[in-house]
Image (spheres, rainbow, N blue to C red):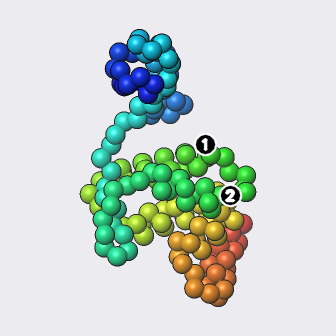
């Protein structure tokens, strides 16, 4: 691992820890050349399916895109960053478990909306308004009616 301060590769690991799910390893390192300390994170790289966009373009999975989208939907809501990370972890697991080489982004959008409706209704409506690209208030109201009907069925 290259030192971010002096760019040498002479360093040693002084501490390693796993996160709660044992999916990420955090390592504290000490550079032997400049005596600085720095942290690195290791995550298992899993081959994710390619995403097929609405216009037919294909692009690789980008976890950060989903995190940013969910952060916008959950802005000023009582949803922690850890909860968002866990949410994205669940979507990633579902992608991995799909066993396919390509997944339509519309499928992922539906997975997100299905889960988000149980987490926070306001975040769900925000996400749906962007994802479904509502063209007018009537489309927005139709989505709210579906949400209310689903809630009534659960009660």
Q: Which residue lies at the image location 36% right of the left edge and 69% below the top edge?
A: 53
Query: Closer to the camera: disc 1 or disc 2?
Result: 2
Q: Is residue 134 above or below residue 79?
A: below
Q: Which residue lies at the image location 55% right of the left edge and 65% below the top edge?
A: 113
- Name the disc covering residue 113, or none: none
* Residue placed under numbered mark 1 in the picture: 82
The local crowd at label 2, few if under 14, some if 14 to 19, many if 20 or more residues have their Cα within 10 Å, is some
| Residue 27 at x, y percent in the picture | 46, 22
Count of marks, rendered view: 2
Q: Is residue 149 visible?
A: no
The reply, left or right, for residue 26 in relation to residue 51 is right
| Residue 120 at x, y percent in the picture | 67, 59
- Name the disc covering residue 75, or none: 2
Tag 1 near tag 2, CB within 8 Å: no
Q: Which residue lies at the image location 31% right of the left edge and 58% below the top edge?
A: 50
The reply, left or right, for residue 35 in relation to residue 48 is right
Q: Quadrant of residue 141?
A: bottom right
Q: Which residue lies at the image location 55% right of the left edge and 60% below the top edge?
A: 69
Q: Is residue 121 visible?
A: yes
User: Label 2's element?
Assistant: loop
Q: Which one is nearer the viewer's eye here, 58 or 116?
A: 58
Q: State the separation of the CA atoms marked 1 and 2.
A: 14 Å
Quarter of the figure with the N terminus: top left
Q: Is residue 118 above or below residue 84?
A: below
Q: Quadrant of residue 152?
A: bottom right
| Residue 100 at x, y percent in the picture | 28, 57
| Residue 83 at x, y percent in the picture | 61, 46
Label located before the other in sequence (1 or 2): 2
User: Label 1's element?
Assistant: helix
Q: Is residue 114 above or below residue 25?
A: below
Quarter of the figure with the C terminus: bottom right
């Amino acid at each position: 691992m290259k030192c971010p301060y002096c760019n040498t590769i002479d360093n040693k690991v002084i501490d390693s820890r796993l996160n709660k799910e044992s999916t990420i390893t955090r390592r504290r390192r000490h550079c032997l050349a400049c005596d600085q300390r720095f942290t690195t994170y290791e995550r298992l790289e899993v081959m994710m399916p390619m995403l097929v966009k609405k216009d037919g373009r294909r692009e690789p999975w980008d976890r950060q895109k989903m995190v940013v989208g969910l952060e916008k939907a959950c802005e000023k809501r009582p949803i922690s960053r850890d909860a968002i990370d866990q949410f994205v972890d669940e979507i990633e697991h579902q992608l991995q478990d799909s066993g396919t080489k390509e997944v339509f982004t519309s499928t992922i959008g539906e997975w997100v909306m299905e889960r988000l409706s149980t987490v926070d209704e306001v975040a769900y409506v925000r996400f749906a308004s962007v994802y479904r690209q509502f063209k007018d208030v009537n489309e927005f109201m139709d989505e709210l009616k579906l949400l209310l009907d689903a809630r009534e069925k659960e009660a």
